[in-house]
Amino acid sequence: MLNMERQRIQDLREIDFSKLEFQDLRWQYGVFQSTSTGSGREKRHGSWIGVKTGLGEIEVKVWCQAAEKLIQQKGKQELLGYLTQWCSERNILKESADRIRKRALQLHVDRIFDNPRWVDFVPFNRRYRPEVLKTARLVTVVSKCCQKPGVVTQEQIDAACEGAIACPCCGRWSHFEVTDSALGISEHQAEQTNGMEMT
Ligand SMILES: [Zn+2]
């Protein structure tokens, strides 16, 4: 770990990329602060918009550059491209391309695609990294809202809040019934759920 806690980073050159890991850049929370320098007539007002990370606070623009660079350094641009595509296809708020890219960078630095509790873990990996699902703990559920079988992870069920999970069909928070937790991935493909029993 690099020990640069509490430092404010405003230039990419202040970051040592030789030992940098994704966890060092993980977006903990955004920081906004009004700033003023000088006094009297010379006083200037500004603002600091940063990201709290393990390295300290990084200016948002610099954080994005750093995340892009680290992903490139680790040869993971393809995965970043998948996440960008994934986020832009679900852009219900009609956000700008820059914001979509920033969101994809946050998700990538978080390694969200490896986290079985991520609500999109199954559909994202089924589309882009099917090999990951071979070792995942998959469970077929039927949720109250859609009444259709869908696949989630055991981890999502373990983390269920008051008996509800994000519905694998529509994404709404919903109660559910487990219909099966022992099938292999080939039988779990949502595209092949025709004929599955609806209980
Ligand atoms: Zn639903």
Image (spheres, grey):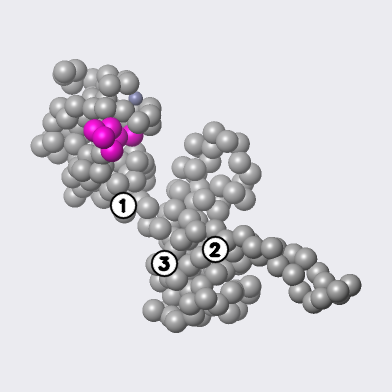
Q: Which residue is mark 2?
A: 51
Quadrant assignment for the N terminus: bottom left
Question: Which numbered disc flags the more N-terminal residue, 2 or 3?
Answer: 3
Task: Give percent across and percent down for residue 189.
Answer: 25, 33
Residue with the mark numbered 1: 115
The kind of secondary structure element at disc 3 is helix
Residue 82 in picture, x, y percent from top left: 45, 48
Callout 2: SS: strand
Q: Amino acid at mark 1?
A: Asn
Q: Amino acid at mark 3?
A: Phe
Magenta extent: 161-166
For mark 1, does the 10 Å Cα neighbourhood hold few (<14), some (14 to 19), or many (20 or more) residues? Answer: some
Residue 106, horizontal then vertical, whole percent: 48, 56
Q: Does the residue at mark 2 contact the one at mark 3 (Cβ under 8 Å)?
A: no
Do the numbered discs 1 and 3 sit on residues whose CB atoms are within 8 Å? no
**In front here: 164 or 19?**
164
Indicate the amino acid at tag 2.
Answer: Val
**Residue 22: which numbered mark, if any?**
3
